[in-house]
Structures are given as structure tokens and as C-alpha cells.
Image (cartoon, rainbow, N blue to C red):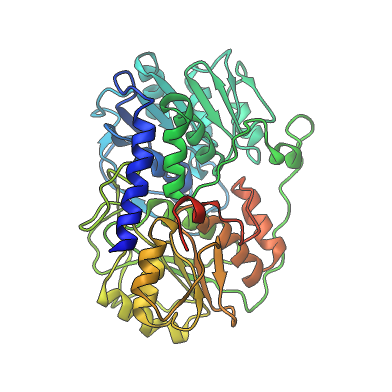
Amino acid sequence: MAAMASFLLRVIILFSAVTSCISTSSLPKTYGILLIPGFDVLDVFGPLSYINSLPDTTVHLIAESSLDPVYSHTLNATMSTIIYKNGQLVIPTHTIDTAPPLDVLIVVGGAGSRAILAGLLQPSVAFIRDRYPTLKYLLSICTGNALTATSGVIDGRLSTGNKRAWAFVTGQGPNVNWVPKARWVVDGNIWSSSGVESGTDMIYSFIKHVYTKPVAQSIANVLEHMPHTDPSFDPFADLYNTSGTLIPPPPTPPIPASAPSKFGVLIYPGFSTMEVWSVLDFINLAAITKNVSLIAADLNPVVADIAPGSISLPFFPKRGQPTIPRFTLENAPELDVLLVPGAPRIPRDPKLAAYIASKYPNLQYLISMGTGAALVAQSGVSNGHEATTAKPFFNQVKQKYKGVSWKAKARWTVSDDGKLWSSSGGAAIMDTFYAFLGHAWSPEGANHTSINLEYVPNTDPSVDPFADTWGAR
């Protein structure tokens, strides 16, 4: 009880300090995300992790022509190879014909954006063009900037885009003032980011600009996200030489026979958007991956972030989006790696804990994310091992599961035998999985994957400012 009381007091103090300095009357209320087949999952769910925590807002996932689930992996008419070996299904809320009025439209990228080269996605392009005059803000991420460029609304404006796909993106907008070296660019009410993970940095900066820095930082504290805050920081522009003759992407490093290739992610009501979708993008793009399975108790859509027992407090998620699992606990395939996400609460589920315990002996690796460490502790497999967990809930988890050697100030931990990994909450899984790939594949393989994501990792597991923020001890 003392741990919970301390936690609630910290949230109330944060909320009181923040709400005293903002007025909500003119803030954006309605957000729309334009989903295209073959979208990049982190382009969507990195920003959504922030937006889901904003007060008095609604979010609409908008598909081009139907309410059928949209697949994040596609082979379109202009692609000779499949970029993503795996994909996930996301359920839209509206089509472009039924979408309500919006204050903010977010245009995301992904492999499927190249369908524009074959004359596809024209309804989406028209939607951007038609909606822009009534928007408060237009945000585009990664190769989504190719769609905004094609729409004509950024002609004469400053913009940037994915550096690996620089020729493709800039080729769609000859009248755009492209900025070759930028993590993100702001021109009036138009914001554009570079590739993939830079969109999450941009949304932090956007919320800081629109809602104030205390709001942005308070959400970042919940997400344990350490954003890059300098828009001119862009090592990938130099890597691909976007200001001159473009340099091809680096080759894929060799893959050892021992590298894991079959990944599974448990999902359950209230699972963390940031944790699951961040690590899925890493897994999808890692060359070692042969398949990835989303596993749940049944095959019904599973809603992220919100579930019975979730914390309904300021800066914690107010809503979540449904996702479709591919396997149940009973028919899931054999795995090399099982990942267990957390939630904005301390999950307790005997059935999931039993599944973890039954699978653990045959796994190469088990990785817990955030309060997913509580499920792993419930299974018993982490007893006697060092672990960490989401810092807002650290003291409560530590108090509940005393058989684990909990480490308060740690971005991630690894057991002595290298099999059991645990990450802190939210965005910490990105740093954790980068370190994991360096261990299970090679440092060059980890770097190759992070370059594709335009992600700059924190490589020191002892760097954990959120332990102090949340009083973890």
C-alpha cells in the first residue's frame, strides 16, 4: 500500500504542476492517422503512444477504401522484393469517405508507400489535399512525405523524409524545398520527419510546441522515452550522403547458424502500445527473423493500453487501438524467442504465466518488457535472477514478487546465462532489443537494423533517468 500511495502522490504532483500552465480551449481535439497497406508499424504507434495519453482527444485510424484490417506487410506492384518478411493487422475506424472533421492529420510511411509509383494510393493523396485547408496541423512521417509531396500541399514548403529512401521521397515533389539533413522540419502548420523512429521524436516536439514542455515530458516519463530534441541531429543524412551523390545502404552482415529466427509476442488486454509496436518494428526489419507470431488467449481483437485494472490517471493512456492476434496459447508455433510486454498496470494472469513457464525450457531467450516482468515473475522463471520493470510501477512489483533480484536503476538487465532479458518500460525496449541483437546476432547486425529504423540507441543499461523520476528503489 505504501508503494501505491507514493506512486499516486507523484502523479498528482506532476499533474497539478502541468495543468496550471496550459489552457485546453484551442488545443487539437481530433487526430487522424492515414493507414496505407504496407504501413510501418512504428510510424503509426510511436506517435500514438503519445497521443493516446493526451486529454480530451479522439483518434481515428483511416483506411482508403474499407474497414477491413490493414496489413503492415505488402508486396505491391512496384516492388520486386518483400521488404518486411512479417506483418501485423490493424483495424481502421473509418475510411477516407467516412472520416470525421480532423484537427490533425498524420500521414505515415512504410514499404507500401512505393505503390504511388504505380499510380496507386491516389484516393489517399486526394484525401490529404482535400483535408489540408481545414486542418490545424499536418504531420508526415518517413516515406509518408512522398504522399504529402504528391498531393501538392507542401509545394514551396520545407520538408524532409526517410534518408534511406531519399531519392524516392524527393522524387515525388520537385517543387518542395527538401531539407537533406534534419530529424524533423517545421514549416508553419506542416511538420515532417525523417525515417521511422524519428517520428516519435517529432511527436514529442510537436506536443511540447502545442501543449507545453511539461505535458510532453510528463508523457515521456510514463513512456520512459528519451527523445532526441534537436531537429538538426541527423547522422543518417551523412550515412546516405543526402546532400550529394547518394550512398547505397550497407550490406546485411553475416547471420550465424545459432541466431534465433522464430519470434513470438504475447498480447493481452491493455498491452503497452509503445512496447509491442516498437519491438515489432525491430523484429520485422531484422534480417535474422523468419517469422513473428502475435499470440493471445483467443483470436478476438485485443485492445492495447486500456483494460480492467488499468491506471486512469493523467499522462497514462486514455484509449487504445485493437490488434488481431495470429495464434492462441494452444496453437502457437515453437519459438526461439518469446517477448512478454507490460501494460499501464501490474498484470496478473495465471494462464499467461503458465504458458510462459511451459515454454521457457525450450526457448533460446525470454524477454520481458515493462510490467511484463511481473508476469514472468508470476511464472517463477525469473526467481533468483536479476530483472527490472517499468519505473512507475517498480516499487509495487518489487514488493509483490520478492523472489526476483530487482534492479531499480537499469534500462535493461540480462541474466548470467544470457537467456533471460528484462527491459524497463515503454521505449526502453528499443535500447534493450538493440543490445539483444548485438548479443544474439552481432553488433554489426544490431547496427544494420537500427540504421534501417533511423534509430540512435542508448547503449549503456545503467543510464536510467526514470528511476529517479518515479522514486524506484
Whether 414 is drawn above or below 28: the answer is: below
How far from the left and from the top, in percent, is residue 369? Answer: 44, 63
How far from the left and from the top, in percent, is residue 198? Answer: 56, 39
User: Left or right: 436 with respect to 318?
Assistant: right
Whether 79 is drawn above or below 162: the answer is: below
What residue lies at 40% left-to-right and 23% top-to-bottom? Answer: 128
Whether 373 is drawn above or below 471: the answer is: below
What residue lies at 22% left-to-right and 58% top-to-bottom? Answer: 309
What residue lies at 39% left-to-right and 75% top-to-bottom? Answer: 376
How far from the left and from the top, in percent, is residue 301? Answer: 25, 56
Q: Nearer the viewer, residue 137 or 403?
A: 403
Q: Nearer the viewer, residue 350 or 23?
A: 23
User: Farthest residue toward the left?
Assistant: 308
How far from the left and from the top, in percent, is residue 326? Answer: 33, 64
- Using the rendered view, name the quadrant where residue 4 is placed: bottom left
Q: Quadrant of the N terminus?
A: bottom left
Q: Nearer the viewer, residue 17 or 134?
A: 17
Query: How many numbered circles are shown?
Result: 0
User: Left or right: 90 with respect to 139?
Assistant: left
Can I make out residue 33 in this image?
no
